[in-house]
Amino acid sequence: MARHVAALALLVAMPAWAQSVTTYHNSVNRHGEYAVPGLTATTAAAMHADPNFHASVSGNVYAQPLYWAATGTTARIIVATESNQVQALNATTGVQIWSRALPASAPSSALQCGDINPEGITGTPAIDPASGTIYLDAVTGTTHAAVRHMLYALSADSGAVLPGYPLDIQAALAARGVAFDSTDQGERGAVLVLNGAVYVTYGGRAGDCGAYHGMVVQVAPSATPSVAGVWATRATRGGIWAQSGAASDAFAIYVTTGNTDSPATWMDGEAVIRLRSGLAAPSKTTDYYAPANWQALDNADADLGGTEAIPFAAPAGAGPRLIAFGKDGNAYLLDRRNLGGIGGALAVTHVSNSEIITAPAVYNTSGSALVAFRNGNGLTCSGSSISMLNITSGATPIKEVWCAALNGAGAPIITTSNGSADPLVWVTGAEGDNLLHGFDATTGRAVFSGGAMRGLHRFSSLIAANHRLYVGADNTVYAFTFQ
């Protein structure tokens, strides 16, 4: 399939194979696309655990690994854990290059609620490719009073903490008169580095304790880092839960929010929000969208904000688009030029009989976009599956083109052999069969299933780099190769 190059030029280009994987799903638009020369539906059958790669890390892994291949340095996999350990591993052998132990993470006894114990680094870090700096949010503090969200900056080359860091997010927001309780606010979204700024998103924790808000914090990174902007839902709750955090079309950032605490009028919950540098609250309907039944979604805890809102190249004959998913099983298609305010979606299509809370992956063709997502109970595949949608400019713009059984809850990625040919969907059976699965992206035919793993967590995403697929798991990283 030919790529829609003109439209994609408006988005951040997918990195070439030899480049680093510096952010969640390999780009700020969060498409989850990777180029792997030689990897086709035929060669995928030879995928196997790399016998030369042996990795050991300290702690449980929820964040996606990153890959850093700067000129003059050994290519490395960067892994962050819930024990607040950050390690760089030789990308070919798995041997540790450096390790950085940050202050102790928070045990569940120090938090109001949550289902991660201990809780340290949950959201995927990001690397600024211009400086080789790793940015991450770590929960620190072993007692309730001491718990803080701390923004760290580390050298990708050595793991050293850079001067001026960490930045205490709670204290920095308090100085601006913004309430933020680190024991209530959770951070499972990926960090975003965009145009010289660092963006971190916050929601709550499992159990919905406390008066948290969905929140985006913009940090100006320097030797004296500071908060440059903040946006929060007007109502309490409305958490930003998506694994990707914020997504971007290189001009603005987009976040999705969950259920708010029963306001009488809409106050930013169940929404897609467009924000720009400085994070001024949107005042026009072009900059936000919420379903007309937002209040019913609030009452049912059926968050629209379970996954990110992803910008993608327009199908032929249409304008720039955005897609989001909800816990109500719906896919929401929006016009990126005008998000539509309350009820203003281009299309709302029921695509699942269960909640959709795992990050999707997007592959553009010349006339449409293919969107793969983990489906807990599909419409045409009963039970857990991986489903593929085709997004076009037609009268019925959202259609399922295939689904395939998947025993697990990992987040999919898409590989091609050269940026366009041989698209394959890869996903782990996290918290299910714990296998690596590959599917032909155009037909859904299974091309690989195997590679038993342990310690995978739902929502986890793999990466493709260095002619391998890497999967982060508790206390280790798995590497698979087809060569």
Image: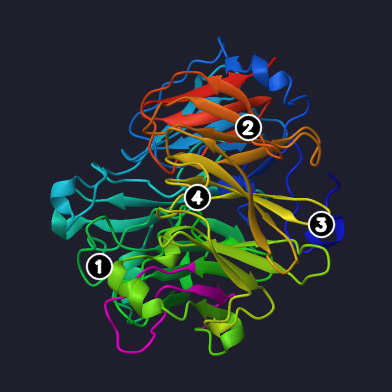
Q: Is 467 situated left or right of 235 in this image?
A: right
Residue hosting label 1: 181
Q: CA distance from mark 4 to mark 3?
A: 25 Å
The percent position of residue 309, horizontal first and vertical second, equals 55, 63
Q: CA distance from mark 1 to mark 3?
A: 46 Å
Indicate the amino acid at tag 3.
Gly
- Seen as rendered, the residue at the extreme top is 51
Residue hosting label 2: 439
Q: CA distance from mark 1 to mark 2?
A: 43 Å
Residue occupying image coordinates x 41% and y 63%: 328
Q: Is residue 212 above or below residue 455?
A: below
Residue hosting label 3: 367
Q: CA distance from mark 2 to mark 3?
A: 21 Å
Q: Mark 3 or mark 1, which is nearer the start of the sequence? A: 1
Q: Mark 3 or mark 4, which is nearer the start of the sequence? A: 3
Closest to the observer: 18 or 457?
457
Q: Is 474 situated left or right of 341 in this image?
A: left
Q: Is residue 327 magenta?
A: no
Which image quarter: residue 415? Answer: top right
Question: Crowding at label 3, few (<14), some or many (≥20) Cα neighbours within 10 Å?
Answer: some
Which stretch appears magenta?
256-280
Mark 1 in CB contact with mark 4 (< 8 angstroms): no
